Image: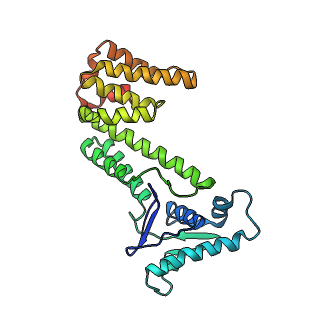
Amino acid sequence: MRINVLGSLDAELRGVSILPTAAKPRQILTLLAIYANQVLPVSALMEEIWGDNPPRSALTTLQTYILQLRRCMETALGGEPGGSKELLLTRHGGYLLHTEPGNVDVHEHDRLATLGQRAFDRGEHEQAAELFGRALGLWRGPALVDVRTGPLLEIEAMRLEESRLGVLERRIDVELRLGRHAGLLTELTALTARHPLHEGLHAQSMVAFYRAGRPSAALDAFQNLRTHLVEELGIEPSQRLQHLQRAVLGSDPALDVDAGTGRVLDRFTG
């Protein structure tokens, strides 16, 4: 069984789609997939579907949705007796979706990101960049983009987006350490436009532009950030960003430190 939630929802079993068409069973499948191999309490599923106002028939209706998911699985299994109940298990007080490692994209994303961080901590920057890139490559669009979201999935969608952005920052950081600043300029320009209040991405953009011999573009990145922060939040950029701006203005030799050491990035973008 393979389930993808990092983008449009997709679910297959033995190459056959098991994706329900109705909105609420899709919600349940998504939540079960995110918490795969863990017991998800009935109360959590009911909260996701109905919030604080479940109908009197909520439990019976939930059981019907679970039955619909199992029927989709049974169809994919060719009517194999009991097969669906070995994948979508009933446990005391809840349900558990059983999957093999790597079969749910969000879990594989987290695994690759963790391995990438471990490689980074060991100073293995090439490997870290590759692992972070593989994690990000699993994304096919915004998480849960075509799934109705209740209170629990709303939280998960925000968590997943923050996770994606965090991995993206770490990947860019590693590539800057590897001296790949020229290849990052277009990506960083788009990212800072998409995230106009994100200091970390703007700091990375400033370092990349400066190292590419474009200090004026680095200063423009700082000014764009400052304008948005002042107009939208009434605050100035952090001392770290102001320090980086002064370094660019003064052509601080520290900005030219060998990218592989990471000292510049630790000082200005970390």
Answer with the quarter of the image where residue 253 lies: top left
Residue 8 in the image: state x and y as whole percent: 45, 58
Please indicate, yes or no, whether residue 22 appears anywhere in the rendered image.
yes
Residue 221 in the image: state x and y as whole percent: 38, 24
Q: Quadrant of the C terminus?
A: top left
Residue pictured at 33% horizontal, 47% vertical: 132
User: Of 101 and 214, which appears nearest the observer?
Assistant: 214
From the viewer's perspective, tell me whether residue 211 is left or right of residue 14: left
User: Of 236 and 23, which appears nearest the observer?
Assistant: 23
Answer with the quarter of the image where residue 225 lies: top left
Q: How is the image coloured?
A: rainbow
Up the image or down, 126 lies above or below 259; here it is: below
From the viewer's perspective, tell me whether residue 219 is left or right of residue 180: right
Give the number of callouts: 0
From the viewer's perspective, tell me whether residue 45 is left or right of residue 226: right
Residue 234 in the image: state x and y as whole percent: 57, 21
Q: Residue furthest toward the right?
A: 56
Q: Residue furthest toward the front?
A: 21
Residue 31 in the image: state x and y as whole percent: 55, 61
Q: Quadrant of the N terminus?
A: bottom left
From the viewer's perspective, tell me whether residue 258 is left or right of residue 44: left
Please indicate, yes or no, whether residue 1 appears anywhere in the rendered image.
no
